[in-house]
Structures are given as structure tokens and as C-alpha cells.
Image (spheres, helix red, strand yellow):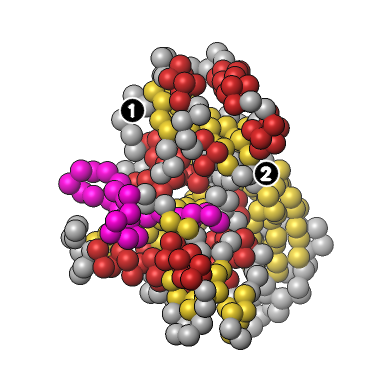
Amino acid sequence: MGEGKQLLLGFEITNETSQIYYYQMQNQDAIPIFMTPNQSNPLFPTCLAVKESTKEWMIGEEALRLFDLGGAALIDNLLHKAENKESVTVYGATFTPEMLLTKFFKRAFMVVRQQFLNSSIQKLVITVPNLTPTMTELIYQSLEELGLLKCRVHIISQVQSYMYYVLSQKAEIWAHDVSLFTYDETGLFYYNLTVNRRMQPYAIIVNRMDLSNELTPELLEQEPLERVVYRLEKLINQVLYKRLTSAVFVTGKGFEGNWIREVLIRLSKSRRVFIGQNLYAKGACLAAKGFIDDSFSNYLFLSDEMITSTISLRLYENAKEIDYVMVKAGTPWWKANKTVTVILDQTKELSFTVTNLLNREPLHEVLSLDGLLERENKTIRLSITVHFIDRLTALVTVRDVGFGVFYETNYRIWEQMLTL
């Protein structure tokens, strides 16, 4: 089953289930990796079990089987534990969320190695439902324990996986808007993907709509199925009304089974329709391939966790005035954090330009360094940091860091908010 010495993997993890795909060069597609030889579904439970007698660890269906037989402890909700930094004590030993994730990944990659002998992971893309700084850091740390450093790993959200999946398809799929409907225990959500071809690079924009109040789990339990199907189809048609849509994707365990089959058939009369539970895993795998060959370099991905503006600082470099980029549009807001050190030259102001890539309108902001100590010109050195509080709010922090042995820092700090 080997595919050469370098593997490109997409690994989807949720609290309930996980799945792994690898990129097959021959077919140029993402192919599932099954945890057991007789398995027909790539999904496996996101859980661990440790056997009391041998302290052996298992994952997935094997973990559930071990637990059902008795004499083993089961650990589930791994992502929830990671986000809440919740440790677990098993048979007198305490395990941190990072340790649990490490054991989960280790067992999963053991299966991969068994199927792809003499191969190594060139690029791994992990996709999770909700990307947060805590989750990202814990996953990176757990993978580093296994020798997978950050240079070989990307961690993205399911929405980003959706974006990468769509852009990996034939252009006719995303000739117009592309819609995604997801339905699981968190609710019903609609995501609309638009490709802005007027921009260079192309901007891939995803907007999210919460429809959970329109189709609740209680409704499925209390209403006749025909009534639920009618309400769902009406809701979908309302959302897509007058929207030129070339494709619709439907995913989530709430849509499992054939109960919406007739709705999808009617939807497909005017557009392409796809349903399945592998969208995010395949998207992560295709993203791994794209990160290696730079096939996404002509696109700027702007989901609801991405910054839509570029922030630059006016500087002089090599006797020329330049706009030094502090934050680049398309960066997850919680990853945007950059520091630069400058020396003032006959000024007590810092000039920032905020350029929104969607409307191209630049906004100029000036930070006045009130209370700046008087010194000889070019002897004031400042550290300037830009980081984000949320997706639409940046905080600029300026510190006097002194000037070598000539002037010690006076610990003066200036701050200013930039609203995007």
C-alpha cells in the first residue's frame, strides 16, 4: 500500500469521531486510511482506553471494545478536555490534555506506519471544529512529542478545510457561490463561499449564518418527519433565494440517513449537490498537497476567523520611505502578533495604514508619543508590537527600550486601539 517515502495527510478530529486521509499522487485525490483491515467507514471514535492489567493504550473501536469487556478505563471528549485544560487521573496516574492527545496521535500514526512502510510524513494538516489558541498550541505540543515539528504541521478549522476542498475542485464547482449546510449536535449552520475574482490574489470569502433556531433537535423528536423535511427544504430555499449557486455541500451527522434524499434531488436540478461526512478530512488532505506545491498561492482565504485588513507602519529603510507590513490580511486573528524595533528620526509620531482588502479603502491612524523624553536625534529606540484582541480590534503597544549603554529604558509604554 506504500505511496513512496513522503506522505501528505489530512486528519480530522472532533470530540466524537476522527478520520485520516492521504494524498494519492496516481489518482490526484484524497484516499481514506482505515483503522482496521475490515473497516468500510474511515470514521473512528475519538477516544482512548487504557487496560488496567498491562497499561496498554488503545484508540477508536478497539478502545470501546476493550472498555466494554471490562478492566479498562475509557477517556473521551479529548478536544473538550484540551480546550478546558482538563487533566484525567487513570489508575493512580494523572495525564494532562497534551499527554492524552499525544497518546491518541501516537496510536493513530502507528496504524498509518503499518500501512505505509518505509514512509514518513512530509506534511500533516489537522482540522478541528473550532480553532482556538489553546487548542492549536496543545496539538502542536503533542505532535512535537512524536517528532512532528511545526514546519511539517498545519492546524486549520473545519471552515478552512471546506475552503481548501472547494478550491481543489474543478473551476465549474466554484464558478458561482458555493453553499455548505452542516447539522450536528451544535446546531444547523449555513456557510456561503464566494470567490472575488476582481482581486489579485483571488479572495475566497466565507460568511456564516446560524440557523439552529429554525431546526432544533427537539423539532426532530416532536414533529413528524414529513413536517421536518418540509421545513428544512423551505429554509434552504429561503437561504438560497436569488443567490446564484453552482454547488451545495451537505454534511454533519444530523444529515445521516436518507431522510433528506428527496430534498437534495430537488436541489440538484439547478446546481451540483454533494453529501457526505468526509468533506473536512479530504479538505485537510488536499490542503497538505497545496501547501507543498504552492497551488493555493494565488488565493487569499478569508473566513470568519481571518483578518480582512493589512496593517503597515510607515518607516524609512535604506534612505527610502516604505510601508512595513506588521499584520497581513488572511491571518487568523489570534496568530497575528508581530514586533519591530525602530529608532526615531525627528518625529514623535508613528503612522499606521489599515487597508481593508475587501473595499480597498485605506485608513490612516497616527499614534502620538506624548510624554516622550527629550534626547538627541536618533537616540530613542522603540519596540512596536501589534496583536489582536479579536478579529476586528488590534492593539498597538509601544515601549521605550533604551539606547544601548547610552540611555537606559524609562519603561514608558504607549497603547492605541485600531478598529478594522
Of callouts 2 and 1, the N-terminal one: 1
Q: Say whether marks 2 and 1 touch (CB < 8 Å).
A: no
Return the x and y of residue 38 as percentages of the image width and height. 29, 56
Q: Residue 266 versus residue 218: which sits nearer the camera? A: 218
Q: Is residue 202 left or right of residue 88?
A: left
Residue farthest to the front?
69
Return the x and y of residue 14 as percentages of the image width and height. 52, 54
Q: Quadrant of the N terminus?
A: bottom left
Q: Residue 20 versus residue 166: which sits nearer the camera? A: 20
Task: Describe the element under mark 2 as helix, strand or loop.
Answer: loop
Mark pair 2, 1: CA separation: 32 Å
Number of labels in the image equals 2
Name the residue carrying label 2: 392
Name the residue carrying label 1: 171
**Crowd tier of the residue under label 1, counting other residues whose Cα lies within 10 Å: few below 14, some 14–19, many 20 or above:** few
At 19% from the left and 60% from the top, the residue drawn is: 2
Q: Which residues are magenta?
A: 13-40
Q: Is residue 70 left or right of residue 415?
A: left
